[in-house]
């Protein structure tokens, strides 16, 4: 043994007779047979030793042994105390000394000798003296019991038995409860104890029961129990309400003085509540016999009713009902129209009466004699359309009434333009509004103008020219006044010009690729002073009139210079002469 055990043997003087590293050397009885390794028993002289380890009947060695030699090994068993036996032939491992030892040969481990956690080693195996479930023995397991309830996984260590300490948390108890009129006050928690095996034992929650009662002399209170607040009292009955009369409710006296535990209640006097034409409070509410009654005037009579319907006296509300102590309903609006009178009737709809025969306005300017019919609609007796009144209304068209419904003007016919006056495609537009008020070009010159209209007109038409355009309608007249100025482009020149008209009845605006044929070509004499000429054109169709100022030229002299052109529009109706 490695552990000191002198505390066991110091009193008997045995210390030094035991080897602490193994089993001590002992004397072995001579003549014993080793039936099994580590087990020797004396043999019977008359019975053969079969090697099974059982004791023979006699005491001599009859068979199984070989020549005896001195056995220097330890004692085979506790009873073998004699030294000097020889190894037996049946012991395969016994070569002069036995090899197996037992810890109980070293020190006792029993209830009488409680050597807890005493440790020894036999043949390299550690042995511990422990008690398991009250049974003491040598064991190879170090598990033990330290007799402490609140430790677990007890084990021998350094000769002492100990384990890991643990604690048991308290159990949370169920909430307080009521058992009829008994209030059971349950403790918040209970403490659990260790079971000695690493677990915790169950615990019982403490309870205190208290009966809920009323006080002495109580007349009407009733005892109650609440799991949260405990015992209390509530108001009980003081008689029976009488609710059969719709004009008068008789309420039994109320129970007073209840609430606290053990309270003593008393009954008050009977109450009379009226609701009739002479004594009423609108929408007052009373509980009688467990039913809520409202004082209302539904149907025109005041009485107690279980329904909250009432009449607020306003015919422009409906579904009237008591709410927050007053009678009110949903509003409805009844507005009269031109042909229908509408009035409130206390419902969600309106009462309607047609204004038959009353004059009205159907909103259509093209009808006359509007009146209300029996269906409450505004209708008419005639049409207001009149061709020739200058207004294109009520379904009139250009085909049926061209005077009232003229063809619309091109979009570019209204305003004066700023075109470069080159050809018809670049003609400068003269607005109709300006022409109606007599338009003038102001002083212009043809010194650098282009030559674009030298075709099929009288001579002196090969000079420089300018082109203007105005949109005309059939029947209208255009008057053009051309005045030349003494100022010429170069010294010594004369100025001779032509005033030409071209008309395009198909154009919808100025900008044709080429000009149409001439409808007017008028020239003037060569002059070095002022020259004036006037020409007119009466349109036979709607279209564009091109007004051309053409300066003449010859091979020997130039006829060009400054001019002023005035154009006026006449014979047009007031509705179409100018743009809107």
Image (cartoon, rainbow, N blue to C red):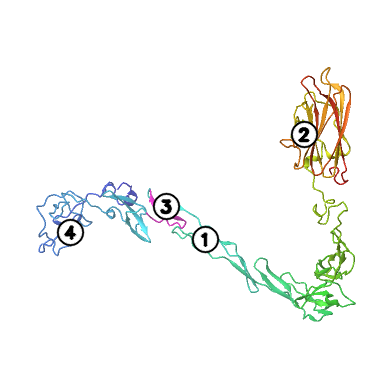
Magenta span of residues: 143-157
Give me the disc on residue 192.
1
Residue that label 3 marks? 162
Residue that label 4 marks? 41
Q: Residue at x 28, y 55 (%)?
A: 104
> CB under 8 Å between callouts 2 and 4?
no
> CB under 8 Å between callouts 3 and 4?
no
Residue 51 in the image: state x and y as whole percent.
15, 59
Q: Nearer the viewer, mark 3 or mark 1?
A: 1
Residue 417 in view of the camera = no
- Distance between mark 3 and mark 2 Cα atoms: 125 Å
In the image, taking residue 517 as reference, residue 208 lies left or right, namely: left
Q: Nearer the viewer, mark 3 or mark 4?
A: 3
Of label 4 and label 1, which has the lower sequence position?
4
Residue 288 in view of the camera = yes
- Distance between mark 2 and mark 4 Cα atoms: 155 Å
Q: Secondary structure at mark 1?
A: loop
Q: Nearer the viewer, mark 2 or mark 4?
A: 2
Residue that label 2 marks? 427
Which image quadrant: the C terminus?
A: top right
Q: Nearer the viewer, mark 4 or mark 1?
A: 1
- Distance between mark 3 and mark 4 Cα atoms: 42 Å
Residue 227 on the magenta segment: no
Residue 550 in the image: state x and y as whole percent.
80, 29
Which is more toward the observer, 457 or 201? 457
Within 10 Å of the Cα at label 3, are there few (<14), some (14-19), or many (20+) other Cα atoms? many
- Distance between mark 2 and mark 1 Cα atoms: 118 Å
């Amino acid at each position: 043994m490695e552990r000191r055990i002198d505390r066991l043997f110091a009193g008997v003087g045995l210390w030094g007779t035991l080897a602490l590293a193994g089993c001590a050397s002992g004397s072995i009885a001579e003549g014993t047979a080793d039936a099994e390794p580590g087990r020797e028993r004396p043999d019977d002289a008359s019975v053969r030793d079969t090697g099974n380890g059982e004791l023979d009947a006699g005491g001599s060695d009859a068979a199984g042994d070989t020549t005896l030699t001195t056995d220097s090994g330890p004692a085979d068993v506790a009873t073998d105390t004699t030294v000097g036996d020889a190894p037996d032939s049946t012991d395969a491992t016994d070569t002069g000394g036995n090899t197996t030892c037992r810890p109980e040969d070293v020190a006792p481990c029993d209830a009488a000798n409680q050597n807890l956690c005493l440790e020894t080693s036999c043949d390299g195996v550690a042995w511990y003296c422990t008690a398991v479930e009250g049974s003491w023995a040598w064991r190879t397991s170090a598990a033990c019991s330290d007799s402490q309830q609140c430790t677990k996984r007890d084990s021998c260590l350094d000769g002492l038995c100990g384990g890991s300490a643990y604690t048991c948390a308290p159990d949370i108890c169920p909430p307080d409860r009521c058992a009829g009129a008994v209030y059971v006050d349950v403790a918040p928690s209970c403490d659990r104890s260790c079971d000695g095996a690493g677990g915790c034992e169950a615990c019982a929650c403490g309870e205190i029961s208290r009966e809920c009662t009323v006080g002495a002399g109580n007349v009407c209170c009733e005892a109650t129990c609440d799991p949260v607040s405990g015992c209390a009292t509530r108001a009980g009955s003081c008689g029976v309400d009488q609710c059969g009369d719709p004009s008068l409710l008789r309420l039994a006296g109320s129970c007073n003085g209840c609430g606290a535990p053990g309270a003593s209640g008393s009954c008050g006097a009977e109450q009379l509540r009226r609701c009739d034409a002479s004594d009423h409070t609108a929408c007052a509410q009373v509980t009688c016999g467990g039913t809520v009654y409202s004082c209302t005037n539904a149907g025109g009579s005041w009485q107690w009713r279980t329904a909250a319907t009432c009449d607020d006296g306003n015919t422009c509300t409906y579904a009237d009902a008591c709410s927050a102590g007053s009678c009110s309903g949903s509003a409805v609006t009844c507005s009269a129209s031109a042909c229908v009178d509408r009035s409130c009737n206390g419902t969600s709809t309106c009462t309607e009466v047609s204004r038959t025969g009353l004059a009205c306005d159907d909103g259509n300017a093209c009808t006359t004699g509007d009146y209300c019919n029996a269906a409450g609609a505004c209708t008419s007796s005639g049409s207001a359309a009149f061709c020739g009144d200058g207004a294109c209304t009520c379904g009139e068209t250009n085909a049926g009434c061209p005077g009232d419904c003229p063809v619309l003007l091109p979009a570019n016919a209204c305003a004066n333009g700023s075109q470069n006056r080159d050809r018809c495609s670049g003609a400068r537009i003269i607005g109709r509004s300006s022409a109606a008020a007599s338009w003038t070009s102001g002083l212009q010159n043809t010194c650098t103008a282009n030559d674009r209209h030298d075709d099929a007109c009288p001579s002196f038409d090969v000079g420089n020219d300018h082109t203007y355009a105005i949109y005309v309608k059939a029947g209208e007249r255009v008057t053009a006044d051309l005045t030349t100025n003494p100022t010429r482009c170069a010294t010594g020149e004369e100025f001779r010009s032509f005033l030409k008209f071209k008309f395009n009845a198909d154009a919808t605006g100025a900008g044709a690729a080429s000009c149409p044929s001439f409808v007017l070509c008028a020239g003037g004499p060569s002059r070095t002073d002022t020259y004036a000429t006037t020409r007119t054109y009466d349109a036979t169709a709607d279209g564009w009139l091109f007004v051309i100022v053409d300066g003449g030229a010859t091979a020997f002299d130039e006829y060009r210079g400054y001019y002023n052109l005035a154009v006026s529009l006449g014979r047009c109706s007031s509705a179409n002469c100018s743009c809107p």
